[in-house]
Image: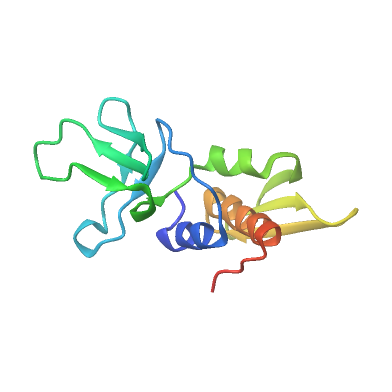
């Protein structure tokens, strides 16, 4: 799983999220900082309203969290979702001594490499680069 810091950078860079079953997310509030939620038609489901998307919690009896606006949630994309976002730019995933490197097609015939301790983080860094180049937003 990618770190909340990388997920925040992806969000700030403009990576769109269309919640669907299986998606993981966090709610960046101190009392919920260690919780990861998963969207499921049985537990958490996105509900579309004219005012925006709300993530509805069904059947939660332990605490009184009924729903949260999508913009208050932090999407934690999975490795397969990050690879899908890369699409045709994805060239290969390499194992290194320190972890993993994702290689993507760059401008023309060049390639760009993004390394991290986990494959998911390397994919996330490659997506961050792709989205930042597309939107012109470089999160700090």
On screen, residue 20 versus residue 94, left or right, reads left
Farthest residue toward the right? 109
Whether residue 39 is situated above or below residue 140 in the rendered picture: above
In this picture, residue 45 sits left or right of residue 63: right
- Residue 9 seen: yes
Number of callouts: 0
State whether residue 58 is above or below residue 92.
above
Q: Is residue 97 visible?
A: no
Find residue 74 and report its horizontal and vertical position in percent: 39, 53
- Give the residue furthest to the front: 50
For the rendered model, the colour scheme is: rainbow
| Image location (x, y in percent) of residue 6 | 49, 60
Residue 72 percent across, percent down from the top left? 34, 55
In the rendered image, which quarter is residue 139 located in? Answer: bottom right
- Please tell me which residue is depicted at 64% across the width and 56% down the height of the picture: 131
Residue sitting at the far bottom: 140
Q: Nearer the viewer, residue 118 or 42?
A: 42
The C terminus - image quarter: bottom right
Instruction: Say whether residue 112 is left or right of residue 68.
Output: right
Which residue occupies the foreground of this view, 54 or 85? Answer: 54
- The residue lying toward the viewer, choosing from 91 and 70, is 70
Q: Relative to 14, is 28 on the left or the right?
A: left
Please state the horizontal and vertical placement of residue 42, each as a whole percent of the image: 26, 25
The image quarter containing residue 90 is: top right
Q: Is residue 64 above or below residue 114?
A: above
Q: Specify the quadrant of the image occupied by residue 92.
A: top right
Q: Nearer the viewer, residue 132 or 120?
A: 132
- Which residue sits at x=53%, y=57%? 10
Q: What residue is rendered at 26% in x and 37% in y? A: 56
């Amino acid at each position: 799983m990618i770190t909340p810091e990388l997920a925040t950078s992806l969000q700030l860079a403009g990576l769109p999220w269309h919640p669907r079953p299986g998606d993981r997310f966090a709610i960046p509030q101190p009392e919920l900082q260690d919780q990861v939620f998963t969207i499921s038609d049985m537990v958490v489901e996105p509900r579309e309203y004219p005012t925006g998307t709300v993530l509805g919690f069904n059947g939660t009896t332990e605490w009184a969290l009924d729903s949260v606006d999508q913009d208050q949630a932090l999407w934690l994309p999975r490795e397969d979702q990050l690879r899908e976002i890369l699409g045709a730019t994805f060239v290969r995933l390499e194992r290194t001594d320190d972890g993993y490197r994702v290689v993507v097609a760059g401008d023309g015939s060049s390639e760009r490499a993004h390394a991290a301790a986990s494959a998911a983080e390397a994919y996330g860094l490659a997506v961050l680069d792709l989205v930042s180049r597309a939107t012109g937003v470089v999160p700090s």
